[in-house]
Image: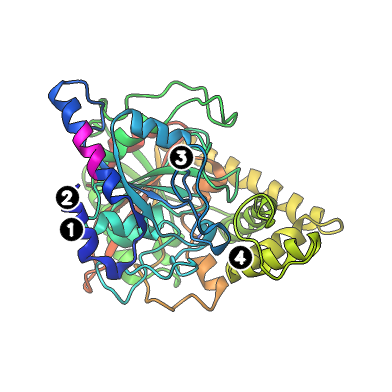
Amino acid sequence: VKDYLVNIKANAHLNAFNEVFEEEALQNAELIDQKLKQETAGRLAGMVIALKDNICYQGHEVTASSKILEGFKSIYSSTIVERLLNEDAIIIGRTNCDEFAMGASNESSYFGIVKNHADNTCVPGGSSGGAAVAVQADMCHAAIGTDTGGSIRQPAAFCGLVGLKPTYGRVSRYGLIAYGSSFDQAGPLTRSVEDAALLLEVMAGADDYDSTASQKQVDAYGTKLQKSSGKKKIAYLREALTSNGVDEDVKAVLKQHIEKLQADGHTVTPVEFDYLDYIVPTYYILTMAEASSNLARFDGVHYGYRSKNATDLVSTYKLSRSEGFGKEVKRRIMLGTFVLSAGYYDAYYAKAQKVRRLIKERTESILKDFDFILSPTTPEPAFKIGHISDDPLKSYMADIFTVQASLAGVPAISLPVGNNSKGLPLGLQLLANQFNEQELLNFSKYFV
Ligand code: GLN
């Protein structure tokens, strides 16, 4: 803990943390040290973890990097935090993120941008940008992020880490600040596949507080982790190697891995994915609709920011929300409300739900014939700060490879596969069948 605290201070300019729990982490380290001596310590004893600031931890502030929640303290802990603490993890702080997890560059945070440790002029990705940089710059051992459409995987790719989005329902959402409830999943950002497997093993499983958390038995992902043996069948999207929208270094690293896999006797086949043009619009229509509904609770009355200029109920709602939310969040609330409104519901929201089903079915049908789908995690490596911040469409297109797994609800992992000539990390992504995290993790060992 002391070492990490030194690194946190030395890297304050990266702005990865919204708050560091310095005293508490030191005290907990002492307690766990005792437990280790008495041989009563849990499976995560001594693992120093940072939490994305949209995960509730009792008695601690949680803001989702929004002004509207500044100063708000959780009155309960999320299920995942309970499970991490039960195994004696040490939580060192809460990390910066895009406001309400909406973004792909960490530039929409009320608490300022986060810088990529590999190149301070570049973004760390988002929305779990602070979580990624906290691990990248050795300010903690691992971090827990949330992923609605890529928010764990994309920053992991931009920062050279392993980032795992579990199957929808594998991990309880109880105590996560909701963005898109039918998409959100928490997961680990780590340096190794081993750590990702162990953290998933601890966090996953049924939960009385979340009926969408699956009852399916949790595998001992960590203990059973071993590099896959046998030959695998892998599909990849042809467009990933041919599209002009994909960076040349990204194409090259994908091609190199395809050739290596083939040389090692695996079957690697290009597949058509007819709905590629629809995945980003479908994702955004549905998540904005869900977000507009989820964010209705921030009304200046229940909790969080209340405008000082309010004079009655309606002005409390209007002014508190107008002053409390940032630009991107407002944009999404308005678009989400629009696609849910009478007269447009069928044309947009209901249509998008139908397209989601087609995307899910097509993804599942590919995964019937193949063990995994391989793609880049992102079309390009970390981009410059300011590059997409004034153009939401650019930001949304950055999610082209990550949102498919989110729409389909299948697990996906981003794996670090080296750097480009400028020293920026590159990531490849693997998708697997629902609840096939064990195989996904085992095969990940092939790459890292
Ligand atoms: N970039 C995507 C979005 O802005 C993903 C965010 C996330 O996964 N939380 O919605």
Query: Between marks 4 and 3, how big is the CA–CA gap?
Result: 24 Å
Q: Earlier in the sequence, mark 3 or mark 2?
A: 2
* Residue at point 26%, 72% (across, down): 119
Horizontal and vertical percent position of residue 30: 19, 36
Choose between 101 and 422: the one closer to the eye.
101
Provide the residue designation for mark 1: 6
Q: Main secondary structure of the magenta part?
A: helix
Q: Is residue 23 visible?
A: yes
The amino acid on which the numbered mark 2 sits, given as a three-letter code, is Lys
Left/right of residue 250 with respect to residue 338 in the rendered view: left
Task: Estimate how packed mark 3 is, as few (under 14), some (14 to 19) or many (20 or more) residues with alpha carbons within 10 Å.
Answer: some
Provide the residue designation for mark 3: 58
The amino acid on which the numbered mark 4 sits, given as a three-letter code, is Phe
**Rendered position, 17 above or below 361:** below
Tell me, for residue 299, which label it has, or none: none
**Rendered position, 363 above or below 328:** above
Q: Are marks 2 and 1 in contact (CB under 8 Å)?
A: yes
Provide the residue designation for mark 2: 2
Query: Between marks 1 and 4, how big is the CA–CA gap?
Result: 34 Å
Q: Are marks 4 and 3 in contact (CB under 8 Å)?
A: no
The amino acid on which the numbered mark 1 sits, given as a three-letter code, is Val
Q: Is residue 409 magenta?
A: no
Which of the 4 image quadrants contains residue 417?
A: bottom left
Query: Between marks 4 and 2, how big is the CA–CA gap?
Result: 36 Å
* Residue at point 45%, 59% (across, down): 127
Q: Earlier in the sequence, mark 1 or mark 3?
A: 1
